[in-house]
């Protein structure tokens, strides 16, 4: 059951995995900021070759929905939709920050609270907070080891200035992502992880689907308007009389 994962929310990432075994068969990432379309198709073909398959072997596609820059994110989502349409495959969408949080949590198995932040430019970050709450409804302290507790997004995704979220970060938080690294003085990253390995996009999608979550939406999480906008009115070339 070969699945394809595509995420262009930050770096261009592609993974191919076996849904039945839960194994990621191949994963590659390119952090160049331009030429997403050229890089993406090359990585897709590369991952399929390494996984020992071809496009006709795919059974589903998972797309990272962002948040991310308008142009780069659009390339990944459009490509995922086209592949799913042409091959008549199920298409699923996942918040890209969820994959980053899963990887950060896997690298810090004792941590219960995480903040992940991606560079949003304009001196802002796309971010979300996650918690591993292994307690129960009685309000008793968590007793299950953190590594075995489910990871839940409790805030975000949203876009903010680093200063606006810095005060909410505690010494117990794991903090990761390109945005945290870029604004290290304010966000105090505890991990060198900048972008999620694309294999974690597939792993998180499988986990979410097994938990009964609805991943049918592939609407992009832009969170703000694109830099380039169409003019709302035509300007006179003659100027004022």
Image (cartoon, rainbow, N blue to C red):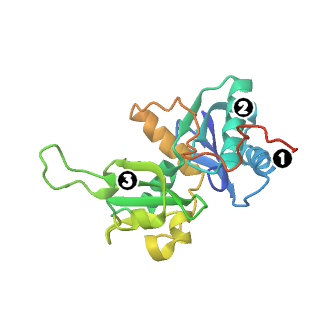
**Residue 159 picture location, percent across and down:** 50, 53
Q: In this rendering, which labeled residue sits more in front, label 2 or label 1? A: 1
| Mark sitting on residue 239 | 1
SS at circle 1: loop
State how far apart marks 2 and 1 are (Cα).
Answer: 49 Å
Instruction: Out of 75 and 209, give the one closest to the viewer.
Output: 75
Callout 3: few (<14), some (14-19), or many (20+) C-alpha neighbours within 10 Å?
many
Left or right position of 156 against 100: left
Give the mark nearest the N terminus, 2 or 3. Answer: 2
Mark 3–mark 1 CB contact (< 8 Å): no
State how far apart marks 3 and 1 are (Cα).
Answer: 54 Å
Residue 219 image-quadrant placement: top right
**Residue 128 picture location, percent across and down:** 43, 53
SS at circle 2: helix
Instruction: Out of 95 and 48, give the one closest to the viewer.
Output: 95
**Residue 68 picture location, percent across and down:** 60, 50
**Going 50% across and 67% down the picture, which residue do you hit?**
180
Establish if 29 lies above or below 235.
below
Establish if 230 lies above or below 199.
above
Classify the position of the N terminus by image quarter: top right
State how far apart marks 2 and 3 are (Cα).
Answer: 31 Å
Instruction: Out of 211 and 125, give the one closest to the viewer.
Output: 125
Quickly name the residue at label 2.
Answer: 83
Quickly name the residue at label 3.
Answer: 130
Q: Is residue 14 visible?
A: no
């Amino acid at each position: 059951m070969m699945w394809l994962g595509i995420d262009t929310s930050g770096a261009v990432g592609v993974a191919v995995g076996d849904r039945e075994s839960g194994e990621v068969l191949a994963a590659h990432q390119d952090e160049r900021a331009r030429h997403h379309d050229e890089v993406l198709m090359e990585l897709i073909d590369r991952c399929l070759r390494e996984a020992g398959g071809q496009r006709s072997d795919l059974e589903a596609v998972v797309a990272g929905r962002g948040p991310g820059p308008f142009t780069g994110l659009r390339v990944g989502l459009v490509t995922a939709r086209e592949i799913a349409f042409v091959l008549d495959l199920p298409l699923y969408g996942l918040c890209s920050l969820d994959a980053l949080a899963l990887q950060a949590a896997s690298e810090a198995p004792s941590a219960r609270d995480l903040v992940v932040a991606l560079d949003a430019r304009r001196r802002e970050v796309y971010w979300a907070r996650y918690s591993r709450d292994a307690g129960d409804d009685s309000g008793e302290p968590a007793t299950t080891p953190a590594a075995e507790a489910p990871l839940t997004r409790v805030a975000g995704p949203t876009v903010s200035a680093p200063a606006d979220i810095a005060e909410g970060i505690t010494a117990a938080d794991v903090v990761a992502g390109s945005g945290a690294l870029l604004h290290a003085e304010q966000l105090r990253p505890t991990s060198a992880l900048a972008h999620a390995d694309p294999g974690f996009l597939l792993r998180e999608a499988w986990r979410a689907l097994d938990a009964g979550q609805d991943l049918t939406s592939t609407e992009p999480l832009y969170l703000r308007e694109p830099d380039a906008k169409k003019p709302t009115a035509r300007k006179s070339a003659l100027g004022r009389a």
